[in-house]
Amino acid sequence: MEIFSGQGKFELSFLDNALQFCSHLIYGYAGIDEKTYKLKALDDSLDLNNHNYKKVTELKRRFPGLKILLSVGGGRDGTYDDNRKVQKY
């Protein structure tokens, strides 16, 4: 699974050696839909079309002790551009 390409290329397989020593993995990021307040993918091409959400959660099969968390918000969400949105959430 490729997450970035070019010089910043990152594939999930790069974590294989490290995950045996990890207790947690945080996948970033998801956003909040302004109308429904439900979680939404911020990068459909990676999260949905490339099935990254599924691939990351499938790591539990190989690393059963791994806790996987989804980071919500952050700079990619765009809600921080408007102070009213920040207060709303």
Image: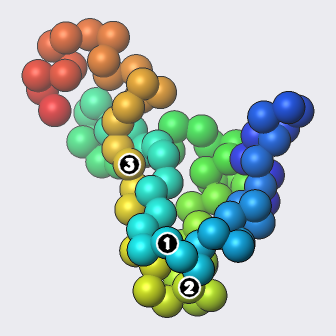
Q: Is residue 12 left or right of residue 88?
A: right
Residue occupying the point 88% across, 33% down: 6
Gap between marks 2 and 3 measured at Cα = 20 Å
Quickly name the residue at label 2.
Answer: 63
Name the mark nearer the viewer: 1 or 2. 1
Q: Is residue 19 left or right of residue 22?
A: right
Q: Position of residue 12 (x, y in %)?
A: 71, 61
Q: What SS does tag 3 mark?
A: strand
Residue occupying the point 33% across, 11% down: 81
Q: Is residue 68 visible?
A: no
Q: Are there few (<14), some (14-19), or many (20+) residues within 10 Å of tag 1?
A: few
Which quarter of the figure is the C terminus placed in?
top left
**Contact between labelled residues 2 and 1, with CB atoms less than 8 Å apart:** yes
Establish if 12 lies above or below 45: below
Residue occupying the point 47% across, 63% down: 25
Quickly name the residue at label 1.
Answer: 22
Gap between marks 1 and 3 measured at Cα = 17 Å
Q: What SS does tag 1 mark?
A: loop
Residue type pointed to by label 2: Phe
Q: Is residue 25 left or right of residue 4?
A: left
Foreground pick, 72 / 33: 72
Q: Position of residue 32 (x, y in %)?
A: 32, 39
Residue type pointed to by label 1: Cys
Q: Is residue 87 visible?
A: yes
Q: Position of residue 61 (x, y in %)?
A: 58, 89
Gap between marks 1 and 2 measured at Cα = 9 Å
Residue 35 position by quadrant: top left
Q: What SS does tag 2 mark?
A: loop
Quickly name the residue at label 3.
Answer: 71
